[in-house]
Amino acid sequence: MLHDQIEQALNQQIALEGGSSHAYLAMAVWAETNGFDGVASFLYVHAEEERQHMLKLMRFVNERGGVACVPALESTQDSFEGLEHVFQLILEHETRVTASINDVVDQCLKLKDYTTHNFMQWYVAEQIEEEALARKLLDKLALAGGDKGALYLFDRDITNLDSHE
Ligand code: FEO
């Protein structure tokens, strides 16, 4: 049986992962309607991955005797200054997600919930990859320096990126 505090922490994480999916969906729409089809494809996939992160947590909460809360959809930012702005927001968002996951892990240790602690290790590893990818893409965009040809190549090449590389 899940400790109430852990159930609450996991439900907060569920809401955060759902919010991530929603935020990346809005970014995908912005990219698609601003001529960045490659970035849009990447972000649609990313949004779907975040939904899977949410579902994985929901199933775990329910399996452990808790009840997963389906988060309400909240309005999210849907206008951006450019690709660098989008990926800067993604990095900031993922940094917040990492902090939240670390907080859940910390609570698991304090309450001696080693099962949830073990389950959360997948998320800890996932965050390392997600933050590294966001930094790598930001570095590429910094190199492009707003040059239209370079942004065209960035948009073309991003579809060949494995989001877990
Ligand atoms: Fe599921 Fe990008 O955090």
Image (cartoon, rainbow, N blue to C red):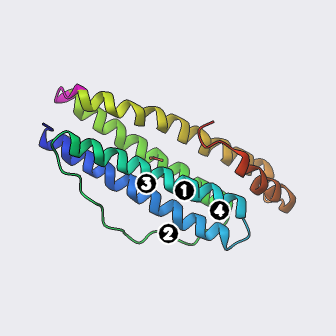
Report the quarter where the C terminus lies.
top right
Report the quarter where the N terminus lies.
top left
Tell me whether the residue at label 1 lies in contact with that at label 2, contact meaning CB atoms closer than 8 angstroms: yes
Mark closest to the chain's N terminus, 3 or 4: 4
Write the start and end of the magenta stretch as one range.
110-114
Mark closest to the chain's N terminus, 4 or 1: 4
Q: Secondary structure at mark 2?
A: loop
- In the image shown, does 76 or 162 lie closer to the viewer? 162
Q: Residue at x 46, y 32 (%)?
A: 125
- In the image shown, does 38 or 148 lie closer to the viewer? 38
Mark 3 to mark 1 CA distance (whole Å): 18 Å
Badge 2 is on which residue? 77
Q: Which mark is nearer the camera, 3 or 1?
A: 3
Q: Mark 4 is on which residue type?
A: Ala
Disc 3 crowd, CA 10 A, few/some/many (<14, 14-19, 20+):
some
> Is the residue at mark 3 in contact range of ligand 1, meaning its CB lies under 8 Å from it?
no
Badge 1 is on which residue? 89
Q: Which mark is nearer the camera, 4 or 1?
A: 4
- Asked if the magenta segment contains residue 68, the reply would be no
38 sits to left or right of 97:
right
